[in-house]
Amino acid sequence: MSKVVESNVTNRRQAMKCLLWGGAGVLWTFAGGVPRPLRLGGEAEAGEVRGFTFGQISDSHIGFKAGAHPSAEDTLADAVAQMAAMQPQFVIHSGDVSHLSAAEQFAVAGEIMQGVKRDVFYVPGEHDTIGDDGKLFFERFGRGHGTGGWYSFDAHGVHFVGLVNVVNLTSTGLGSIGAAQIAWLKNDLKGRASSTPIVVFAHMPLWSIYPQWGWGTADAAPVLATLRRFGSVTVLNGHIHQVIQKVEGNVTYHTAYSTAFPQPAPGVGPGPGPLKVPADELKAMLGIRRLEVVSDRVALTDKTLAQ
Amino acid sequence: MNFSSRGFRPILTLAAMSIAVVCATALVPGSRAAVAEAAAPAPAPAAAAAAVSTMQSDITIDSYMFRPAVVTIAKGTTVVWVNKDDDVHTIKSKAGPEAFSSPALPTGSRYGFTFKRAGTYRYICSVHPYMHGVIVVR
């Protein structure tokens, strides 16, 4: 955690007025010294936010095998069974569905994911775009109407945005959004009330966790500039196979567990490869996420496969 | 080039043994061998990659690095990359007289390319673009 680069909150006064609680995307205001939840979706809002839950699954790496490690298919099946039991309204898969971008790996992953019995919204990871910039991935899992594969949708008054930051990685290995996608995002958010809760999901972290390993996105700044006016922004990422969270103004960032294998803490060891752990400890390092939107709050619960 | 400092990782030993098999397949004259199947273990010692070779040069991918990172070879030499990491890598050219691009190379797999034109080639792993390598063909 010490390696996490904390950004400055430029408007300190505003930061004092608003306190995000427990990294859960709850926006509070202080009125007369008493903290009160800020009403998002207030009287003037047409799209009222109603309570609902959704799930996040990440980094299933179907096809990954290493020594005595249990198959990524088996651990994804465990994750899917847990997710199905939670009965979310829908599920987000934040990328690295496959290990090698192979058609049969996508097919197996899609089949296992059907076990959640809910709609699944995918974005690709860099393991899903090897050699073909994600052609096979988008053929099976694509939602975007444009060529780049990004998209948005609304659910219960919350606006969801799926971004693609794993095509054209920078020379230092960072994720990249690109001018076309940023222009699309600006247009997508234009005219939306600032009180609309926003959930952004993309594979690689949208903040700089450990750039030496490519754990960040080079051009995240203009994306965040576009999001800054919104009162509640929740950013969901995968890629680093561990839960790290950060709060910056009204924006909360959360990376997720993998369902396949853990990775080392930022900067520990020669590279971000699979972390070898004793078999009986593995499931405590894999997991899924439940997100609950209650009125104007997004509350996250990370649950390991051992729980 | 030697692997002894990393010999404690058993997966590396297995991958190193595959080099003898690679040599047999990669020496087809003028061939552009793109091989990605799992390595078959063979009872050979870990071959040290030669920096200069008339026909073949081996490069290992280990701890997110190409080793050696810079290789000088004669025209017509086949370079064979062997992935000894637990992660997936690729070989993708960035600059040089000819372009080359491997499929995804899981642990223990290999990729070969025969360099027929002189010049300096720069390449990366497209999954981890901070991994850089250079081939100089004379």
Image (tube, rainbow, N blue to C red):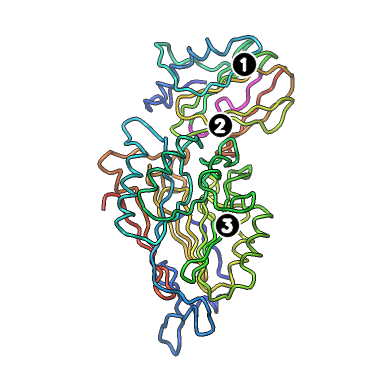
The three-letter amino acid code for the residue at tag 1 is: Thr
Q: Within 10 angstroms of label 1, few (less than 14), some, or many (20 or more) residues?
A: many
Magenta-drawn stretch, dominant element (helix, strand or loop): strand
Quote the CA–CA distance across marks 1 and 2: 17 Å
The lab-note entry on whether marks 1 and 3 share a chain reads: no
Nearest the camera: A140 or B107? A140
Q: Within 10 angstroms of label 3, few (less than 14), some, or many (20 or more) residues?
A: many
Q: Position of residue A303 (x, y in %)?
A: 32, 56
Q: Chain of mark 3?
A: A
Q: Chain of mark 1?
A: B
The residue at which mark 3 appears reads as A151
The three-letter amino acid code for the residue at tag 2 is: Thr
Quote the CA–CA distance across marks 3 and 2: 29 Å
Q: Are marks 1 and 2 in contact (CB under 8 Å)?
A: no
Direction from residue B7 to residue A4 in the image, left or right: right
The residue at which mark 1 appears reads as B78
**B70 in magenta:** yes
Q: Secondary structure at mark 1?
A: strand
**Magenta segment boundaries in residue numbering:** B63-72
Nearest the camera: A202 or A44? A44
Q: Secondary structure at mark 2?
A: loop
The residue positioned 33% from the left and 35% from the top of the image is A69
Quote the CA–CA distance across marks 1 and 3: 44 Å
The residue at which mark 2 appears reads as B90
Q: Is B119 rendered above or below residue A134?
A: above
